[in-house]
Structures are given as C-alpha cells and as structure tokens.
Image (cartoon, rainbow, N blue to C red):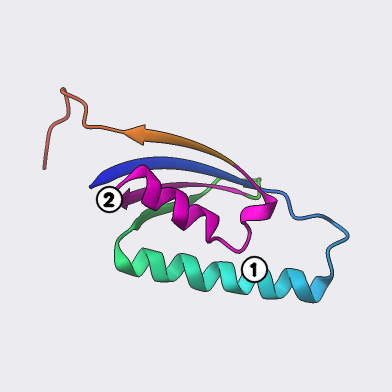
Amino acid sequence: MALFHVRMDVNIPHDLDPEVRAETVAREKAYSQELQRSGKWRELWRIVGQYSNISIFDVESADELHEILQGLPLFPYMDMEVMALTRHPSRVDD
C-alpha cells in the first residue's frame, strides 16, 4: 500500500447552474463516502474558512490514486497538491 497526502481546493464557477452544482456535490459526497468505507480514503479534514480539504489516501499505487482523483465529480473544479508519504524513522508506533 502507498499513502498520499492530497490537498484539494474547490473552485466551482459562480455561474454554474444551481441544479448542476447540487447534483455534482451530491455525487461527490456519495463517491467520497464509498471510498472512505473501502479504506482507500483514510482521512478527510476540512480546512477552516476555505472550500478545501486535506485527505490521506491508502492505495496500491500512484496510478490508482490518479484514477480515484479523476473520478471525483468535482475534479474539473479542483486544484490539487499531491505528496507521497513514507514512514519517518523517528516515529513511535502504537
């Protein structure tokens, strides 16, 4: 498994049809919750005061993460920053 830290900044156009916006956001929520239940989307944290989040993904590869991110209904409206993670040698395991 590979861990990735992903920051997602959402920039939905203000002139997007409200029905399209609501439907897209609803599909995004369902898709993200499915991935959370599967364990692939391990953490999801909101950034206070922004339409942004920090997420931790636990996937097989960068290719799998890429497929997951491209599958997000809000993908066309997002700027993302992806960082691969590895264990720190000073980490104390529980």
Q: Which residue is mark 1?
A: 25
**Is 14 displayed left or right of 68 in the figure?**
right
Left or right, 57 with reference to 76 = left
Q: CA distance from mark 1 to mark 2?
A: 27 Å
The amino acid on which the numbered mark 1 sits, given as a three-letter code, is Val
47 relative to 22 in the view: left or right: left
- Which residue is drawn at the image coordinates 83% and 63% (left, top)? 16
For label 2, the crowd category at 10 Å Cα-Cα, with few meaning under 14, some 14 to 19 and many 20 or more, is few
Residue at the image point whose x is 27% and y is 43% from the top:
2
- Give x and y (percent) for residue 7: 52, 41
Please check the rendered image and state whether residue 11 is part of the magenta-colored stretch, yes or no: no
Question: Residue, x 29% and y 61% (percent of image)?
Answer: 39
- Crowd tier of the residue under label 1, counting other residues whose Cα lies within 10 Å: few below 14, some 14–19, many 20 or above: some
- Dividing the picture into quadrants, the one containing residue 48 is top right
Most distant residue in the top direction:
90
**In-image side of 18 versus 35 (left or right):** right
On screen, 79 above or below 59? above
Image position of 17 with respect to 11: above or below: below
SS class, disc 2:
loop
Q: Identify the amino acid type marked 2.
A: Glu
| Numbered disc in front, either 1 or 2 | 2
Which element type, helix, strand or loop, lies under badge 1?
Answer: helix
Query: Picture coordinates of residue 28 (x, y %)?
Result: 57, 67
Location of residue 36 (image quadrant):
bottom left
Q: Residue 61 or 45: which is nearer the viewer?
A: 61
Tag 1 near tag 2, CB within 8 Å: no
**Which residue is drawn at the image coordinates 33% and 58% (left, top)?**
40
Q: Which residues are magenta?
A: 52-79
Q: Which residue is mark 2?
A: 60
